[in-house]
Image (cartoon, helix red, strand yellow):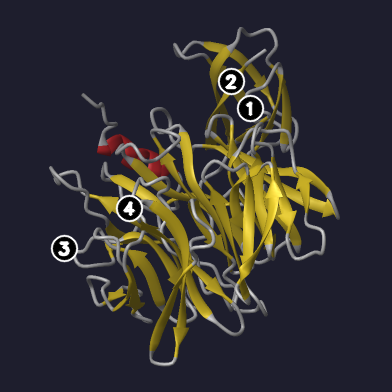
Amino acid sequence: MRKFISASFIAILCNTAIQAQFVVKDVLAVSPQASIFDPEYNTKLNIVCWKSDDNNLWISGLNPVTHMYEPADGKGTFITGNLSPNGDGSWNGPEWMLSTQLTQVVYNQTIGGIRYPGVATQVPGGWQNTTLFQYPGAAYSMATANYADSTSRFLIETTGISGISWVRNTDLNTSYFHPGVTLGFFARDNQQICCATSQAKHPGFIEVSTSFPYFTFISQDTIGAPYMWNDPETNSRLFMYRTNWNRTMKVYQEITPGQWILYNQFDSPLPPPFKFITSPEPFTCGGHSYISFMAAQSGSAKDGLPAQIWIAGANPGDAFLRCVSDTSVAIRVDPEPVVFSDSAFVYYTYVPTDKKTTNQYLVRKCNTGLGNLYTGNEVYKTASPVLSVFPNPCSGIANLRSPSIFGSGTSIEIYDLTGRKVLNTNATSSTSVLDLSPLPDGKYLIKIRKQGKEASTTVSMLR
């Protein structure tokens, strides 16, 4: 029997990460009878593409005021059928592929037991579909989605082949290939493929728009879910991924061309069993960068266990962390940050637990409390203090950071898992260095306090 953490306990945890004036608004965005899988949002046209339970591709409208689905069941325009079923080698659904000339959707179809990528193109009066039989065995497809690009590209990973292929939308019959990489995602705002080496899963990216595509390493971590984007606050490239067995988010910053440094990192804001970070995605709003993610009970987020939806500031000086989903114990998957001209939301898929025979995928919408993208005015921006620790796990020396609390007189307490205090000291600046080498290997709770403010996190000793 599964053991769920109580709703009241989660409520306390969520309330510690938000200001009193921020009110969670987590509402159903579709009809209660709808079932919508892996939706992807196009805010310029106020539409969304998604896959149905019977493996059809649909386009729905989004109300420009309420940002709810229109029609409520999402079945606005039927595009094509025979999309690859859930679990057939990949859980990925359709993806937008955008450029100055075209609005397109890439997807995977299963025909005769073989998976092929497909492209749907918006044309006057409807949509035109093309199945790309020249690329059999496609595990999944991802695409660039920037209307500012003169051409767009989509990538393919193929079953049994170590490497990533990509194709330009202006020449669907010519593909390019980089061996020895996997986990491909296009950067948010550039035609660079964020990925990892196939064997060691070290992070990096491929420059695909050059005559000779090349791979740039970021770090030696073993990673998942790589993303890259331009941060408007620092006007620099940021690269993020999850590591430490999917328990830690790391953000790297490019300080000079080709030189990357660790910029920020944080663990799940919830205690076990919600110790994993899953489905992270970056977004920008009001001149700042944020990351939406789930605090989950497993690293895969596909096991039917409860999760919470959170957002965090990418800037380490921001100290911003907020729970945006409600406090109910619920199965939540696939959070998607969506920024409109007047607000920013996180849409996610909610799986009702009372469905005995089949899964139903409902879409819910969370208000982030962030303000207008164009004016830069942000509402309810300040959250409770955040404490970060790195490296984590550490082999003896750990660096603590909490800009809003740390300073002369800040108390630091370390507890083992039995609740016994094993260390008590004081900080002297906004960053404190702790020598944990006298302690045995294991996991420890760190608490800091100053003038009524407090924060906590965990660190693991591993030699």
Estimate how packed mark 1 is, as few (under 14), some (14 to 19) or many (20 or more) residues with alpha carbons within 10 Å: many
Label 2 Cα neighbours within 10 Å, binned few <14 / some 14-19 / many ≥20: many
Tell me the crowding category of disc 3: few under 14, some 14 to 19, or many 20 or more residues within 10 angstroms, Cα based: few
Please state, as top left, top right, bottom left or bottom right, where the N terminus lies in the image: top left
User: Which badge, 4 or 1, is on the more N-terminal residue?
Assistant: 4
Q: Are marks 2 and 1 in contact (CB under 8 Å)?
A: yes
- Residue 449 versus residue 310 in the image, above or below: above
Label placed on residue 85: 4
What residue is at 51 percent from the left and 44 percent from the top?
159
Residue 33 is left or right of residue 84, and the answer is: left
| Residue at disc 4, secondary structure | loop
Q: Secondary structure at mark 2?
A: strand
N-terminal-most mark, 2 or 3: 3
Q: Can residue 186 be seen in the rendering of this structure?
A: yes
First in sequence, mark 3 or 1: give its number: 3
Q: Can you name the residue that lies furthest to the right here?
A: 256
- The quarter of the picture where the C terminus appears is top right
Q: What amino acid type is highlighted by mark number 4?
A: Pro
The numbered mark, 2 or 1, whose residue comes first in the sequence reads: 1
Amino acid residing under circle 3: Gln
Q: Which element is circle 3 on?
A: loop
Which residue bears the numbered disc 2? Answer: 460
Residue at 73%, 33% (x, y): give it. Answer: 220
Classed neighbour count for the residue bearing mark 4: other residues with Cα under 10 Å, few (<14), some (14–19), many (≥20)? many
Image position of 1 with respect to 122: above or below: above
**Which residue is label 3 attached to?**
33
**Could you tell me residue 289's position as x and y percent?**
61, 59
Instruction: Name the mark nearer the viewer: 3 or 1.
Output: 3
As rendered, which of 213 and 454 lies closer to the eye?
A: 213
Residue of label 1: 392
